[in-house]
Amino acid sequence: MKRIVIFASGSGTNAENLIKFFHNRDHASVIQVLTNNPHAKVLDRAKKLNVSALSFNKIAFTKTKDVLNLLKSNNPDLIILAGFLWKFPEFILKEFPNKVINIHPALLPKYGGKGMYGHFVHEAVVANKEVETGITIHFVNENYDEGAIIFQATCEVSHTDTAENVAAKIHELEMEHFPKVVDRLLKN
């Protein structure tokens, strides 16, 4: 059985989607959700679905080995960043080479990097009058949004779309593709 740990910072819709997708699978399951936000809705979502959910602070994540040791004890086959807003420490990445992936709400390399997340991305896409955008699932390395791309899916952006319209389109792509891509990764 493959073991998945999810990191999230907010509402946790992607985390919930992944938990539900793998719930009755015989080859993989989400064993834990971790968050840097003690008030994140993802904690409630995970607990309602009977998945262990914990929050941690910046010191436990970047200065000590508390989060690293927790990950080691869980022995995950894949660590998924699903709306997780902190940069992943290199010392954790080194312990889990090619086992940490992220989903980004744009077609990288466009609209990536520090500060480019959520509505900031969608606002930039609309402001720059892009005709398409999408999602990118990629491996995580020491730089924001620069790891090797695993998968991309696109959607059109019309001249009348607002950032909210774009966000809804991106959410649909995430819900449809993210679990399937994770499943393929775990099976390979």
Image: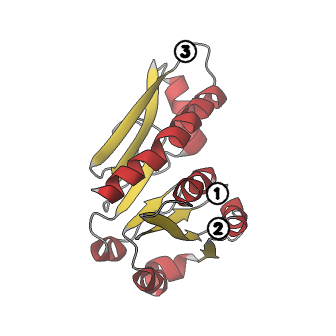
Disc nearer the start of the sequence (1/3)? 1
Disc nearer the start of the sequence (2/3)? 2
Amino acid marked by disc 1: Gly
Q: Which residue is mark 2?
A: 37
Q: Position of residue 68 (x, y in %)?
A: 42, 81
Q: Which residue is mark 1?
A: 10
Q: For the residues marked 1 and 3, what is the alpha-carbon distance in whole angstroms?
A: 28 Å
Q: Which residue is mark 3?
A: 158
Q: Is residue 121 left or right of residue 73?
A: right
Q: Position of residue 96 (x, y in %)?
A: 31, 72
Mark 2–mark 1 CB contact (< 8 Å): yes
User: Residue at the spot x=32%, y=57% of the render?
Assistant: 187
Q: Is residue 15 left or right of residue 46?
A: left
Q: Quadrant of residue 186?
A: bottom left
Query: Residue 141 or 74: which is nearer the viewer?
Result: 74
User: Residue at the spot x=45%, y=77% of the render?
Assistant: 62
Q: Position of residue 140 (x, y in %)?
A: 34, 58
Amino acid marked by disc 2: Asn
Question: Does the image show residue 151?
Answer: yes
User: Residue at the spot x=39%, y=79% of the render?
Assistant: 75
Depicted 164 relative to depicted 27: above or below: above
Q: Secondary structure at mark 1?
A: loop
- Quarter containing the C terminus: bottom left
